Image (spheres, rainbow, N blue to C red):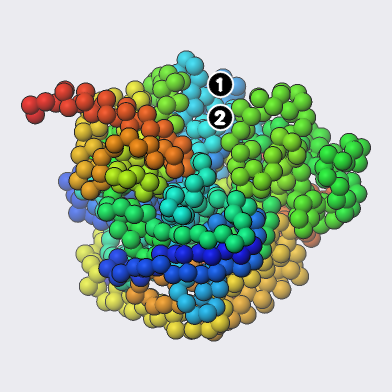
Amino acid sequence: MEPARIEMLESKIPSGPIERKWEKARFDMKLVNPANRRKHRIIIVGSGLAGASAAASLGQQGYNVDCFSFHDSPRRAHSIAAQGGINAAKNYRNDGDSIFRLFYDTVKGGDFRAREANVYRLAQISVNIIDQCVAQGVPFAREYGGLLDTRSFGGVQVSRTFYARGQTGQQLLLGAYQALEEQVAAGSVKMHSRSEMLDLVLVNGRARGIITRDLVSGAIESHAADVVVLATGGYGNVFYLSTNAKGSNATAIWRAHRRGALFGNPCFTQIHPTCIPVSNENQSKLTLMSESLRNDGRVWVPKKKGDNRAPAGIPEDERDYYLERRYPSFGNLVPRDVASRNAKEVCDEGRGVGPGGQGVYLDFADAIGRLGEAQVREKYGNLFDMYEEITGENAYKVPMRIFPAVHYTMGGLWVDYQLMSTLPGLFVAGEANFSDHGANRLGASALMQGLADGYFILPYTLPNYIASNTLEKVDTSHPAFAEVKDEVAKRVARMVNVRGKRTVDSIHKELGRMMWENCGMARTEAGLRSNLAGIPALREEFWHNVNIIGSGEELNQSLEKAGRVADFLELGELICLDALQRAESCGGHFRVESQTPDGEALRDDERFSYASAWEWKGDGGQWELQKEPLAFEHVHLAQRSYK
Amino acid sequence: MNLTLKIWRQQNAKAPGGFATYQVQDVTPDMSFLEMLDLLNENLQAKGEPPVAFEHDCREGICGSCGFLINGVAHGGRRGTTVCQLSMRFFKDGDCLTLEPWRARAFPVLRDLAVDRSPFDRIIQAGGFITAPTGGAPDANAILVPKDAAETAFDAAACIGCGACVAACPNAAAMLFTAAKVTHLNALPQGQPQRDRRTLGMVAAMTEELFGSCTNHGECEAVCPKKIPIEFIGKMNRDLICATLHHRGE
């Protein structure tokens, strides 16, 4: 059989008016007869919102699904930590919302670096997601009449965010998890917990399986299928300190990238403005405080450099409410990227507060004066409690201290309109793909995208791929499996046998510092070039001096971490390379060289109105850049302004 | 501050385990408990000794991965707190702490402080869901849910499946975990069609997985990091009686 041809960057956007594209695409898709579905095997890696919802939905349709998770249970996936809510263009509030407005807000919020057709489809599907989740018993907030409650969120002017207290991600994930477990009981889904994907297997150019490591026994295993889905989340942990869970990693998408899948917009990372500042050098992660706090909290720093008086001792006229000063119309509610960058600037000027000067105040004194402590407690009580639990400070009495932290990655594997990567048979869903958020994601849109991909897009596009291609019978006895399995086993053994002096964490922290310093909130050519020299050197250090105690044939958490860090040491370099070539500022990507006279991000649509897609060309930092041009036919290209 | 830790070390499920004693120096009050263990592990690895295996992921108290006993108390005894959110400022210089994995027949130790909690997934498989195949749902506002039912459902659904309730119970019962899911789904209008099947199925699965029964000690509620109240066990028992009567003779 002839190898499948890799069709580079053909986005496969259906023709016709934007509001009919998804309908047309679905009608044009080929179907698989119900009786034939059980003959097809689908591998889904990841069990978060995208993975669990896809596994449950495809299991219901009658396919044989194998779902993999490195956690002990699919319910642990990091989707569970999302706090705020999920957007949907239901217009239940009668306040002017519509599918078009959600589409418009998302394209604009992404600073015009996302594909219009994908975003429109996301807005269309958003309404079905809420229906689906309610039917599953997700306990969304309700009005007294029994109808759903919504709130406003993240700088948009309508109230379209559905929520379940501060634990929306948890409740949506449990809904998908329960649907998944129902399919496990029915026998259509087989769950492989504590099983980490370490490589992708291609047969004749098509994705036909994966190699995993059993995290308890250490056994390296092969799994074959007709199609492989990666729903493995984002790569924010390349920065070491982030709001991501400790286990969140890029290994699955990175291994697929090395096998030929193009990586889209790697430098588009989101830094969230309201996190609890770093307090000690052993800090292992950063905790997010919901963005909703900016509705009532006022952000300020002292006007004077190095003013270390207690906040209450600083008189009103010696405080700089810098967001209100610079952005009178949006004030404290400017988008995430703008708020983060401004916090960095005032701290760089030496006006930051708290230990190390890396923090700004988020002050509720005015809100408490206006509303009373009881009402503030009712709105934000759980967040104030969490803050006190971590910092030991009572935010009703003293202002909170906050600082930006890495939160989400908009980039990911490049996918076409069908969510298929450049490798035939390899689909990518949720945060792991690059598709819908452009250069900046709006609040409450990550949950929406993960579930749209899993519940309502893959269940159409996967069967279409299966029905449109003649897929030869392949099982794990095919030589391609033995070959890749051998490579994986050798790599694990090589890592274990370095027996050097440095722990995995110490190397990861060093990478994180480099990334944060030179490829964080503000990026310069010189800083990026220094990383492009520093990261390969650190990678060398890893492969010659890492120390992993124990063997590969046991539960070995250092080894698990080491494999992930080894991949971050390659991905970090690509992120910097992408940030270097994109000599414009857009969304979360701020190039110091490209700003307006008053210090705002300056986009360059003439030169950079494209999605970058990088092709792996071998070890040692070799990549080739391809570009998918972006056309804006429905949303007028404009410089964002929040003044 | 400096601490003495007595930690359960066990290489795998089949190997015998035992306590080992370690000193940790230079612990600061702004570290979390797990960051203190990270520090211990860095030091152990520098000496060529295997680090202590413990489960963790989100480190913000929501994923349910972490959990072990500190001086015999699940998650360390601070009300409503998982061990990942437990701050070191609640400890003092010179403290001696004993760390052990969850102890329950249904949760075999995998290594050190990590145990196998897969029985929880199987309890969910036995009925902890509402059957709603993707695509067939009516408009979300077509289903009215009274606010108090939604609140009860949420209070129960807050469970993170960490297993502390089992570890704290003298009978190693999984009643609080199971009751939380039964209460969540049985409180909602959407959950009514499968109410009896769910309750009977999940309670049967709990027994098959070798968990004990509830004898009202209330230890589970005391250690639950999400403050799930024990009254949900009462609710589940009422539902169980009703379901058993509805289905008697079957």
In the image, A322 versus B6, the foreground residue is: B6
Residue B82 has which mark? none
Upstream in sequence: badge 2 or badge 1: 1
Task: Decide if residue A588 is in sight here.
Answer: no
In the displayed structure, A304 sits above or below A363; it is below
Residue receiving disc 2: A160
Q: What residue type is labelled 1?
A: Arg
Q: Is mark 2 on a helix, strand or loop?
A: loop
Residue receiving disc 1: A93
For the point 11% across and 25% down, which residue is it?
A: B248
In the image, A418 versus A52, the foreground residue is: A52
In the image, A179 versus A290, the foreground residue is: A290
In the displayed structure, B184 sits above or below A638; it is above
**Rendered image quadrant of residue A627:** bottom right
For the point 32% across and 28% down, which residue is it?
A: B234
Tell me the chain of label 1. A
For the point 56% across and 19% down, which residue is it?
A: A94
Task: Decide if residue A152 is in sight here.
Answer: yes
